[in-house]
Image (tube, helix red, strand yellow):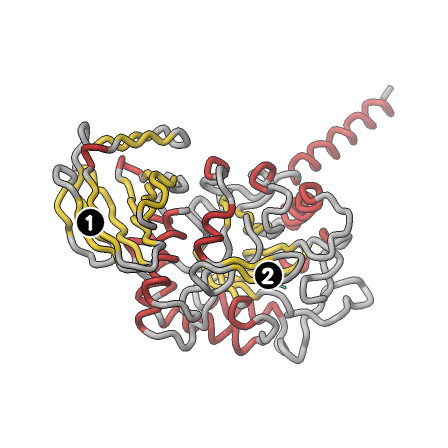
Amino acid sequence: MKKIIFFIFIIAIIASATRASAQKFQGLALTPPMGWNSWNTFACNVDEVLIREAADAIVASGMKESGYQYVVLDDCWEAMARDNAGNLVADLNKFPSGMKVLGDYIHSKGLKFGIHNCAGTKTCAGYPGGRGHEFQDALLYASWGVDFLKYDWCSHGTANSEETYKTMRDALHTAGRPIVFSICEWGDTKPWEWGKDVGHLWRITGDITDCFDCEVNHGSWSSWGIIKTIELRKGIRQYSGPDHWNDPDMMEIGRGMSQSEDRAHFSMWAMLAAPLIAGNDVRSMKKEIADILTNKDVIAIDQDSLGVQALKYTDNENGVEVWVKPLKNDDWAVCFLNKSEQKQKIDFDWSKHYIADDVSNKILDTKGIQFGIRDLWSKKNLGDTKKRLTAEVASHDVLMVRLIKQ
Ligand code: GLA
């Protein structure tokens, strides 16, 4: 009898330990994560000098003060093979000081350390992936002081995505260091349907590219410009929220689009409550670019604690779309996005619009509540919602306002 009780006791302990690790770290991304990632500009040309300089620039440019936190080293940091004990190793030509030292440097700047790997056997650039090594890798990342893991989906073979990402989630949790878990399977297996308990953000599209509205065909997949990235996934805004975000990919601001296109891109990422991960060379960016990336009023829309992704209210009148995002304290953000090739006139009579959002259960009805209107780019007050809003919006630009409850 004693033996049976002992046996049941052991099983109960194992079961509770398994339960304890079968969860993600809670509360690490109550607002969309903000940071910088090496991939869009540098691809495989990464080394420790670059990452340290990027961290320095994030501080010097005011990005850190505006909320950017994670310095994410994407693909190509590894040596081509694991060591004899099966551990991942950094490429010592690129990272001679090693990853722990790099993490320490990033932390010494008051920033957080992000790294990339892949749920498949190889990363997309052909370096060792995590498959079959999840628990070992998670311990290594924890020992390096990693705070954010972007986990890709190349070379996954016949693996089931949900199960594979859950394995890594459990590994991270077991290793014990709180790490934001960024699922990067491009929306292939609808991560919004299963990702909430697995990661803190999930990519919803393939790789973005630096054009306003184009598609670059790579054969089996396409990369998308800003507008196509926004348009590709419809009907998934209800899946995004505090600690579990739809991720339309890293930003292309400061990488060749016009200033108005960059502004429109940033505005829309904020409306979508997207993770704000810059992808430009922050070391050499012009002031106009830093000004866009650090617009605190726009960032406040992205980081609003209600965490509701905007809804598209009107579609394409003369190429202009109206997007609305409910905010805490009954404020709203409204973004007039001019996708057309010409400037367009806006003439918006608030009293004629009653907007009911069935995701947040918020209603924008200016007959009930009056709002002051603040232009988040010109920083001017534009009166209130008692009178119609008239303005001109340049091609590929936005008028983005905050309605402030009075
Ligand atoms: C995939 C991801 C990109 C980047 C590359 C690295 O394509 O979607 O964001 O991480 O892999 O190889």
Amino acid at pointer 1 = Arg
Residue 360 visible in the current orientation: yes
Q: Tell me the element at label 1.
A: strand
User: Where residue 217 is drawn, which disc sits there?
Assistant: 2
Q: Residue 226's x, y, as percent?
A: 45, 57
- Is the N terminus in the top left, top right, bottom left or bottom right quadrant? top right
Pointer 1 local density, CA inside 10 Å: few below 14, some 14–19, many at least 20: many
In the depicted view, which residue is nearer to us: 188 or 85? 188
Which residue is painted at 52% across and 58% down in the image? Answer: 224
| Mark 2: C-beta under 8 Å from nearest atom of ligand 1 | no
Q: Check if mark 1's residue and mark 2's residue have beta carbons within 8 Å.
A: no
Q: Nearer the viewer, mark 1 or mark 2?
A: 2
Left or right: 337, with 216 as reference point: left
Amino acid at pointer 2 = Asn
Which residue is painted at 15% across and 49% down in the image? Answer: 382
Q: Residue 396's x, y, as percent?
A: 34, 59
Compared with 117, 405 (above or below) is above
As measured in the structure, the alpha-carbon distance from the residue carrying label 1 to the one carrying label 2 is 40 Å
Left or right: 36, with 220 as reference point: left
Which residue is painted at 30% across and 30% down in the image? Answer: 363
Q: Tell me the element at label 2.
A: strand
Residue 136 visible in the current orientation: no
User: Where residue 374 is drawn, which disc sits there?
Assistant: 1
Q: Quadrant of residue 98?
A: bottom right
| Mark 1: C-beta under 8 Å from nearest atom of ligand 1 | no
Compared with 360, 347 (above or below) is below
Q: Residue 169's x, y, as percent?
A: 64, 46
Which of the four quarters of the rendered structure image does ligand 1 lie in?
bottom right
